[in-house]
Image (cartoon, coloured by chain):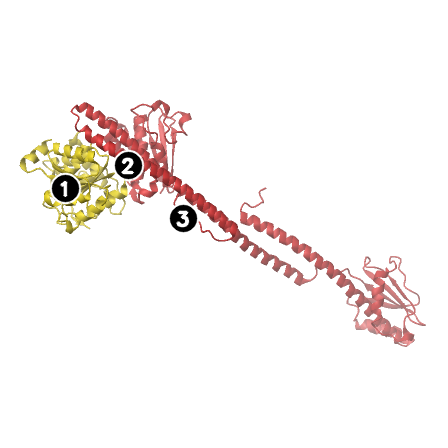
Chain colours: A red, B yellow
Amino acid sequence: MTIWPRSLGTRTAAVMMLMLATVQIVGLTIHALDRVELQRLAQTRDVGVRVMSLYRSVALAAPDQREDVLQELERRGTDQRDGMTAELLPHPPADEELPQTPIGLRRPIVVSMGLVPVPGPARARDIVMLGNSDQERLLIGMHVPDGPWLVIHMPLPPPRIWHSRSFLVAFVLMTAAAALITWWATSRLTAPVRMLANAAEALGRDVRAPPLPEDGPSEIALAASAFNTMAMRIRRFVQDRTFMLTAIGHDLRTPITRLKLRTEFIDDEDMRRKMLADLDELESMVSATLAFGRDVTIDEPVSTVDLAELVRTVLDEAGDGRPDLADQIGYAGPHHLPFRGRPVALKRALSNLVQNALAYGGSAQATLSCADGMAQLLVEDSGPGIPLAELDRVFQPFHRVEASRNKETGGMGLGLPITRNIIRAHGGDVVLDNRPTGGARATVTLPV
Amino acid sequence: METAASQAANAPPPHILVVDDDREIRDLLARFLERHGLRVTAVRDAREARRALPHGHFQMVVLDLMLPGETGMDFARWLRSPASGHASIGLVMLTAMGEETDRIIGLELGADDYVPKPFNPRELLARMRAVLRRTSDTARPADATQPRLMRFGGWTLDPARRRLLNPDQVEVPVTGGEYDLLLALVERANRVLTRDMLLDLLRGRQAGPFDRAIDVAISRLRRKLEDNGRHAQIIKTVRGGGYVLAAEVERL
């Protein structure tokens, strides 16, 4: 259902407004029905008193002046405003359309007539009452003693329930006030939920995000406290992992240092060189493990660095390391691109990509561009590319493309995971795919 | 090594104080350095180092930062204070690899260089030699410690973090070799550095033919300094083989 709003606050407000409207409508209907009773009561009293007043004036007048009194009263027009008319007839009123007035309506009118005092001899001999509220008019005949019938047509408008203006104003005002209070209350009530969502989001980006305040309504405080406990456990877990990896690294560096020193006392130069190479490999494994375990955001402050020059420096160093492939390394893009980031970490991330391109693809062409606030770096090689099945697994730690499990190209399987950790810590991402023309391509995007 | 041999012939060998708590590393390092023409006294902690310092005419201290008892940092701070009487002695720090903050603090405390463990012994030797050359340099300022920042022609060199900043304060990345080369040129601004001196600086750092490495590094530095190769204004080529940094250097 698309009408149903997505936000919890709006939903709660909508439900509450619906409830309020229902309650208002029911309440106002009860009130209106009460009004109908009241209006009917007032109407019967009005009819009784007016009819009797007219009768009194006519009955008390001299018999030959009765017609004149009636005309005089009509001329003054006091009773014509709602269509009441009166005439003197020699016979009781008759109208085929009108039934006898039911006793329920007749009695209160007759009772009201008693409110107008009439001297005993002038009292009406007989009262005929026709019509009902259904016909919306009454025909009342009163027999003047020794005289004609005074016949009165009396409109009987139905009670008007929704007539009052104040009623409408009250309804609108109440609805508006209720809506305002509902909106305020629900936005207050749902604010902690939003806060919780924001905190979870912040935790995802930075494990050391500040804890939530544990106040407010008890349920919210409980949720905040549970969330903080969870965040603390995650933090401890990350810390433990970092401590463990750092400890391993530290413990290994002493024996590796000793071994490197010992190689200096080996007379066989060839052997010495090979041992040193092995130790370098061992060291790079340890440092890769350390780099993977470490949270890049802890070690290094953010500063402005020339990303273009960083890429070129990485390429230069890669070329120095592999002089045989130096011709296969190229850069295209701007000369300068200032970027806010962590230079040492970024250099490590980009260096891994370039090293991979050289190791697996035998070349590294870097293309840097910047558009719409996003810097994009392509690192392309001309090797066999990456098997489709491996494309999404190459970012898993300690995973290595099967065919490359040999000494020349094999590493720890941590290069790409480290690269992705670093790039993501900068708010960007890195993906790998195969070029249509052959070879693998790494695409790094970074928000400038 | 030729340079070592000639040095040994001309002057008494420099005396080095090695401070490391690992006995094996201490002994192996002492043997290795002695083999390359240096005199070495090795001690296990800061207390022993303080006791040894007044008696040896030391030119340099090689200090492990992770020491039992008084830390290497505290010892370095004391060493650089006038109270030690050895404030201008060469100081090379050894510490855990990649500990960026350690390195920054260490260099800010006045270490002349920093070598992460596990180090390649020959690279350590090359770095020690470079520091020895620098500290024996008569032009070395009296306070011996490196300035926090050096500014030349709008550019800034930040020795503590081994960074180069352009006039807009944007970091321009440099490799370790390029940094050492630039630092040498900046420290001896307006003096010609011969190819041999620069070669020594890069030794142990770069693979491949050194001759070419110097030219490549200089041309990359010029690119980074936006110094047009043909009409270079900052790093000038001197006929007869050498380079000079032609700019006023402001030490901050």
- Looking at the image, residue A445 sits to the left or right of residue B187; the answer is right
Q: Chain of mark 3?
A: A
Please tell me which residue lies in front, A193 or A134. Answer: A193
- Tell me the amino acid under the disc marked 3: Pro
Q: Position of residue A255 (x, y in %)?
A: 25, 32
Pointer 2 or 3: first along the chain: 3
Instruction: Decide: is A310 above or below A11.
Output: above
- Looking at the image, residue B71 sits to the left or right of residue A32; the answer is left
Please tell me which residue lies in front, B238 or A418. Answer: A418
> Mark 1 falls on what kind of element?
strand
Q: Residue at x 19, y 31 (%)?
A: A261
Residues at badges 2 and 3 in contact (C-beta under 8 Å)?
no
What mark, if any, has residue B60 been given in the picture? 1
Q: Dot 2, crowdedness within 10 Å: few (<14), some or many (≥20)?
A: some
Name the quarter where the N terminus of chain A is drawn.
top right
Q: Residue at x 22, y 34 (%)?
A: B119
Q: Quadrant of residue A316?
A: top left
Instruction: Decide: is A111 above or below B166.
Output: below
Residues at badges 3 and 1 in contact (C-beta under 8 Å)?
no
| Residue at mark 3 to residue at mark 1: CA–CA distance | 46 Å
- Looking at the image, residue A227 sits to the left or right of residue A245; the answer is right
> Mark 3 falls on what kind of element?
loop
Residue bearing the label numbered 2: A250
> Mark 2 falls on what kind of element?
helix
Please tell me which residue lies in front, A4 or B32. Answer: B32
What mark, if any, has residue A210 been given in the picture? 3
What mark, if any, has residue A155 been given in the picture? none
Instruction: Decide: is A81 above or below B43.
Output: below
